[in-house]
Image: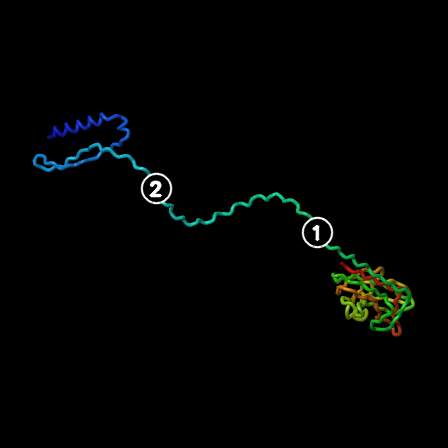
Amino acid sequence: MKRAAAAVLAAVLVACSATSPAAAATKRRSTTQRCVVKKVRGKKKKVCRRAAVTRGKTGPRGPAGRNGANGSQGAAGQQGAQGPAGSQGATGPQGPAGPVGSSPALTRYASVAGEITTDSTTWVRLGGPQVTVTVPESGTIAVAAAANSIATVDGAGAVSLFEDDEPIDGQAIGTTCGPDGFLFGVDNDGATVSTFGTPGNGFICFSFGAPSTVLFQTTPGPHTYELRYAFACGCPGSTAGFANRKLWVIPQP
């Protein structure tokens, strides 16, 4: 029996080796192991043999499966460096012309020649000078005033700036140089003639020489400004004197 089986196996191997090369190329071979249980010399024994097995052709590829669900979004990355500035754009068209502005307010000036005297310790009107000014929206005016002393008078006098019949705010209050609302003083020494003017205050009653401007804040609109006078101090029976009085009021933009 063994010899018969061997002869059959040899015949199979010869037949397989005679297959054409083209046919052999279209098939895939692999080996498989077959085991049987035989009784050899009264004992059962497992006998295994390897035999060549022809594998079939690979089948067509199946359809693609569905896409899986999207994963969660990752954290934002770091911000990149700022890029270079772009080139400047073209100049836009010129805008429309603005409204025509108003002319600047003009300086108002008035003067009164001659001499006046008074022994009143309160402010009195002695003929000006007086000006009317339209104060601009700034509400600011610059004021300068001056007067000469009189050689034949020996009392000190005080001058105040009135706005619409009231002392304008911003002048000295409670001074030894004159009543409240003191602008500047005139010192008559009974011997010489000097020019006095702004600025003056409660500590420096007199300012000699050409006057300088001082600023006042008020309300916009038309106002009338006038210098008024008072007796400040002197020997009993003396009076205050003023001559060649001048007033400038300059509206400020």
In the image, which is nearer the foreground, mark 1 or mark 2? Answer: 2
Amino acid, disc 2: Pro
Amino acid, disc 1: Pro
Q: What element carries label 1?
A: loop
Q: At 11% across and 36% down in the image, what residue appears?
A: 38
**99 lies above or below 50:** below
Q: At 28% across and 30% down in the image, what residue appears?
A: 26
Q: Does residue 248 appear left or right of residue 78 in this picture?
A: right
Q: Quadrant of the C terminus?
A: bottom right
Q: Mark 1 points at which residue?
A: 96
How packed is label 2: few (under 14 Cα within 10 Å), some, or many (20 or more)? few
What label does residue 63 carry, if any? 2
Q: How far across and how far down the image is residue 69, in percent?
A: 39, 48
**3 lies above or below 127:** above
Distance between mark 1 and mark 2 Cα atoms? 72 Å
Q: How far across and how far down the image is residue 122, in percent?
A: 82, 73
Decide which of 206, 89 is in the foreground and name it. 89
Decide which of 124, 104 is in the foreground and name it. 104
Mark before the other along the chain sequence, 1 or 2:
2
Q: Does residue 5 appear left or right of residue 19 in this picture?
A: left
What label does residue 75 carry, if any? none
Q: In which quarter of the image is the N terminus?
A: top left
Q: At 15% across and 28% down in the image, what residue appears?
A: 8
**Colour scheme of this structure image?**
rainbow
Q: Which of the 4 image quadrants contains residue 205?
A: bottom right
Decide which of 87, 238 is in the foreground and name it. 87
